[in-house]
Image (cartoon, rainbow, N blue to C red):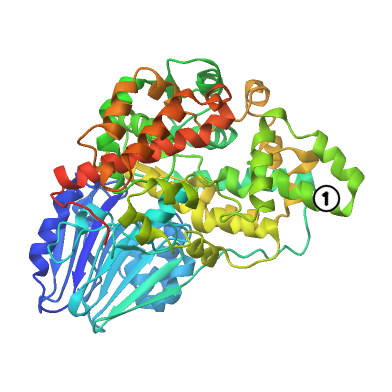
Amino acid sequence: MCGICGVVGSGLDIQANIERMLPKMAHRGPDNTGSWISSNKEAGLGHTRLSIVDLSPAGHQPMANEDGRIRLTANGEIYNSPPLRQWLWDKGHAFRSASDNEVLIHGYEEKGTDFLPLINGMIAFGLWDGPNEQLLLCRDRLGIKPLYYVLLPGGGLAFASEIKALLACPEIPAAIDSVGLKQYLTFENTFGARTLHNGVKMLEPGQYLLWKDGNAALHSYWAPSFEASDTLPDFPQACEAYRETVHKSVARHMMSDVEVASYLSSGFDSTTVAHFAAQTTDTPLATYTGAFGQGGWYDETPGARAVAEHIGSAHTEVRMGATDFASALDDLVYFMDEPRMGIGAFSQYMVAKQAAERVKVILTGHAGDELFAGYPVFKLLLLRRTLGRNPLKGLGLLLRVRPAEWPHVVYFLLQQLLGRSGRFLPTLFSSSMLRKGLKPDVAAALKDIRPEEELATLVGDDPDPYRCLTRTYLRAYLPGLFVVEDKISMAHSLESRTPLCDNELVELALTWPLSLKLNKGVLKAIPKAAMRSVLPDILYEQPKRGFPTPLGSWLRGELNDLFHERLLGQGSPLHDLFERDFLEKSVAKYESGWQKRVTPLDQIPTHRMWQLLCLDAWLRNSTERLGRSLSLA
């Protein structure tokens, strides 16, 4: 929805810093820019607005309460704002706008931070409490919207929706965080508050920060809970509950004063969301699918077309290829702020760019696999548990593992048996690879860092593997995906919404056991069965894909020159981190390795090359576009 920023503390040129930060986030909010500075010049808020709910000037931010002593800058949407607004109205609060965000001000007036668990939405906000001279920062339950902050010398604090905005402040140094680098190289992600920028922290999902008198304190207001319902539904009842809950969630997520569109792949999550979204509109829903020149595994257009025809949507296929990747790489990484997980970020970026030519809001299918057992690793957990309790039943489940699922099942089984870090997340660069490949000074700085340590803290030591896996997805994996989705959509002034992350649906999913979600050994059994009568048959006749991108064939073919130039060229900043010999051998092995003939086995090697390309682009962008050269802190 917007870009937000703020600075608090004494002895700082707050107005100048707000003015430096706002232009760095102009893409997030091209419709209006606003700022507010306290009378004592020790607190300031900034806002760039993408107008979606209440398009009038009354919805501009930073906005204030009735007496002007509380100020708010917020990014996101509150889908249960109508009942919250009515409750607050009944309590005597006066609203100045129709903006859903205004309930944050009055909710805080009414209940303080006890209001936060009542919010159903995607939101990141900063609220200045003038009477108490206190700043509140908050991020939604699942971390759908990002919020970064830096603790400044002298007790001050700066925050923003994007890291590039923070780096516009001269008080904030630019350097690479060693732990963040080790995490990224190992897992293609950073966890919790960690970023790749030293000193720049991210507020964690379900967390709020209170700053007062130069002191900042972090608090949690939500965490995943696996309390089972009093009566466990049978499979048909679970399917009905899923269908009804998703329908209500999508209806809530259609809240908008502008047109809402939907992504549409050939998977069950985006097609389910698009199906219900189409039922709420008087005009054909706009839908968008990414498409590549390659057919077969990389072609999701037949399934998407069938759904589009079925729901009567105004469908657009966004064509892209290797030359588009070459043109977009630097911009993509610039808008992401730092390298993050997922080769699919490129294709999402290109589809978002096309969608933004028509709409400001688009729905996604994020979190369906993580909440409703859509990955083969879920089968592995059920298999291991069932074989131990009932070998005969376990054998039946074993026979239902599809050939395409076996590489994933075997990989994660080996991860667990070998006791490797991040049991449920793939390891990209191992510690031994990094010892051999990094420059001696870099290797020494990273040597004693355990990249899984902060991941383990996030997940906890729950003895139940299924709960452990779900926490890994909710606390570590999904937040990384959400950061990418936010950045690549907002790069084009497009707000992406995630109906499958609605509070009601998440809480429902957490009450259901794995055996119910994998009924008869079928991945994502509940969503598939729930939508069987309304989605086209073609969706049930094709393999699971996950929006694959043919990067491997591009790097070994059309983009081979770019590939070599970026990783091996004389001007590559990667050579400040890695030994050139290591990069040369890695590229040669990737180009000639036997894994390239087997798509599932080629995924991790290709992700390694994606990581290196992103690191190269990140380091170049920092110097050339932000004027801040990066080296290890």
Residue 100 seen from this side:
yes
The spot of residue 493 in percent (x, y) is 27, 41
Q: Residue furthest right?
A: 392
The spot of residue 559 in percent (x, y) is 33, 22
Depth order, front residue of 551/499: 551
Q: Determine the residue positioned at 19% across, 69% down.
A: 7
Q: Which residue is mark 1?
A: 386
The spot of residue 198 in percent (x, y) is 29, 62
Give the vertical position of 384 relative to 276 (above or below).
Answer: below
Left or right of 130? Residue 179 is right
Depth order, front residue of 211/243: 211
Q: Determine the residue positioned at 19% across, 76% down.
A: 153
Give the vertical position of 529 relative to 427 (above or below).
Answer: above
The spot of residue 314 in percent (x, y) is 42, 22
How many numbered callouts? 1
Q: Determine the residue positioned at 66% across, 45% down.
A: 377
Quarter of the figure that contains the C terminus: bottom left
Q: Give the amino acid type for the residue marked by disc 1 in the picture.
A: Thr
Left or right of 600? Residue 570 is left
Q: Mark 1 Cα within 10 Å, few/some/many (few <14, many 20+)?
A: some
Depth order, front residue of 316/385: 385
Q: Secondary structure at mark 1?
A: helix
- The picture quadrant where one finds residue 471 is bottom right
Residue 625 seen from this side:
no
- The picture quadrant where one finds residue 285 is top left
Depth order, front residue of 275/266: 266
Left or right of 280? Residue 39 is left
Left or right of 486? Residue 374 is right
